[in-house]
Image: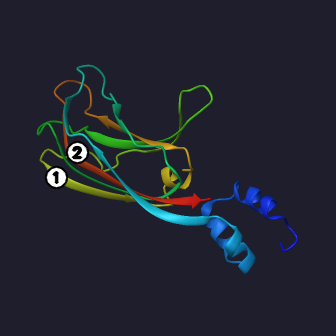
Amino acid sequence: MELLDELVLRHITSFLDPKDIVCLHRTCRRMHTMLPEVVVTEYQWKGENFHIFGPRGGHWAPEHYFDGPVLPGNAIKLESSVLWEDQGFGNRKGELFVHLMRPSRTGKPLQIAEHRQLFGIAEHYEKKAHKVLGKEDPIIAKSRKGDFYRFMRNAGGGGGHQLKVKNFRVKATLCEVKN
């Protein structure tokens, strides 16, 4: 390692995950002074309150809720919370879920991973829900700089289905490499 040029080592780190940069960073003083800094940062996102009605036909009618911002680093954890309910009678179908999206050359982003039933299925009464997703979940483990999260909603089809959501919050913990 002592013989490798600084430019070469910096280029090598551009292919490494942040955790690997931290490990390499700790190998010697030269690495510590030369390699980029790895920083853990928290971001907060909010979804708008809504009250939607499902279509009369079909049973699965997902729709776009909102897109989070482009990730400046790898996700470590997503914490989500909501106050929500379905129509209050009959079958329960209301759900929120999230996709990990990656930009592509075609301009249409690719879905890399999905986490369905972020809080389960909405209850007949207003209820607070909270969920923490960590590295064991593919939408976290597969994330990388430049990706974004797409939040989806489904009231359910078949007539009469509703989904009411208030105070949807997401706290994203990211690991960023600072050059």
Residue found at the very far right of the displayed protein: 3
Report the amino acid beneath label 2: Ala
> Is there a contact, CB below 8 Å, between mark 2 and mark 1?
yes
Q: Is residue 63 above or below residue 164?
A: above
| Disc 2: CA contacts within 10 A as few (<14), some (14-19) or many (>=20) | many
Q: Which residue is mark 2?
A: 122
Report the amino acid beneath label 1: Lys
Residue 47's label in the rendered image is none
Identified at 24% across, 24% down, the residue is 158
Mark 2: which secondary structure? loop
- Tell me where residue 130 appears, x and y as whole percent: 28, 57
Identified at 57% across, 50% down, the residue is 144
Q: Which residue is mark 1?
A: 127
Q: Is residue 27 above or below residue 9?
A: below
- Tell me where residue 56 appears, x and y as whole percent: 23, 20
Camera-side residue of 36 and 60:
36
Q: How many marks?
A: 2
| Disc 1: CA contacts within 10 A as few (<14), some (14-19) or many (>=20) | few
Asked whether residue 28 appears in the rendered view, the answer is no
- Tell me where residue 81 appears, x and y as whole percent: 27, 54
- Looking at the rendering, which quadrant does residue 6 occupy? bottom right
Asked whether residue 111 appears in the rendered view, the answer is yes
Mark 1: which secondary structure? strand
- Tell me where residue 123 appears, x and y as whole percent: 18, 47
Q: Is residue 39 above or below residue 144?
A: below
Measure the C-alpha gap from mark 2 to mark 1.
8 Å
- Which quarter of the rendering shows the N terminus? bottom right
- Which quarter of the rendering shows the C terminus? bottom right
Is 83 on the left or on the right of 60, as rendered?
left
